[in-house]
Amino acid sequence: MERRRFLAAAALAAISPRLQAQGRREIPVVGALYEQALPNDFSRAFADGIQELGHVQGEDLRIEQRSARGVAARLPALAAELVRRKPRVIFAAGDDAARAAAHAARTIPVVFAAVTDGTMQALVRNPQQPEGTVTGVAPLESRVHAKRLELVRELVPRLQRLAVFFDAALPQAELVPLQQAALAQRTTLQIIGGRNAEELRIALDADAKRVPQALLVLPSLVFNGFRQAIVGLANSQRLPALYPDRSYVEAGGLVAYGADIPGMCRPAARLVLSLLQGAKVAKLAVEPAKFELAVNLRAAKAQRFTVPRAMIARADRILQ
């Protein structure tokens, strides 16, 4: 009798760890790579997107975050570190982060957000049906350059000369659609490339004989880091300006037309979850970001500038 009890207890002891292991569900790991220090607008939007879809961090998935803290040179090593954590998917926000993640991941799916057209085209040959391991959410800016020029002309109907702030580190090819639209509308572009506010100011002041009638600021994650200075520069010279997203309007800018850059991380979260649930990258087309028109009537009043009523009527956001 005692021997049977001993054998039963021994068998139970052997089986118990296996039962416990079977009862523990493996939580998938998602890598997240950011250029900016944590927390930032992108990490918050991505976390919100996960939560809004009914998933709980720590229960349904675990997010391993890495940040370059504004130093892009750190990204390749951080991406490699994430790969060693064996994530099921890697999410990357920003151009340099997306490129570093795609290079390091190889066979691991990568979902990007907040990248320029050049980066998207470099990583995904066919946005409608990605052939590799990379997809994401992108503003597809080149499609709206002509629209931005139309909006500037609506602000300044007799526009002949337009200053354009452009991130000097981005490919010049990204300017081609804008240059073609300007040529068709007989508008002269004064392209001003720079990587900081002082470079932009010096270049803008350099040609005093040909003063622009308006300013167009093209999208750049670098510019976002000193948007207040850009807005201040435009306002100090009383230049009607069109900015790439509403954050510039919230910083005192006049009008903006563009994607909600951090907001792109929300649909990116949906793509990440789809991949965790077994979807294939080839079935997940690159999603275009939603664009919005924002108008700052307070800035218009301060500059004694009249924003056309038709533009105000179409605005998605109005600051009074």
Image (cartoon, rainbow, N blue to C red):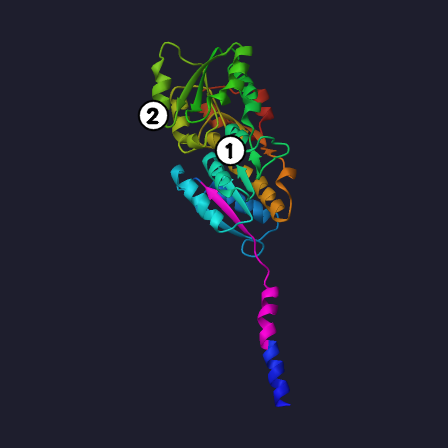
What residue sits right under mark 2 in the picture? Answer: 198
Quick one: label 1 or label 2, which is nearer the N terminus? 1
- Disc 1 to disc 2, how far (Cα)? 24 Å
Q: Is residue 20 magenta?
A: yes
Given contact means CB atoms under 8 Å apart, are the residues at marks 1 and 2 in contact?
Answer: no
Q: Position of residue 188 (x, y in %)?
A: 47, 11
Residue 292 disc label: none
Task: Sort mark 2 into few (<14), some (14-19) or many (20+) by Cα contacts within 10 Å.
Answer: few
Which one is in front, 219 or 286?
Answer: 286
115 vs 69, left or right, is right
Q: Is residue 164 visible?
A: yes
Q: Identify the residue at horizontal 59%, vertical 72% (top origin).
A: 16
What residue sits right under mark 1 in the picture? Answer: 115
Position of residue 40 relative to residue 239, above or below, is below
Inspect the image, locate mark 2, and give the three-letter code of the amino acid beneath it.
Glu
Inspect the image, locate mark 1, and give the three-letter code of the amino acid beneath it.
Val
Element type at mark 2 = helix
Q: Identify the residue at horizontal 41%, vertical 19% (top origin).
A: 192
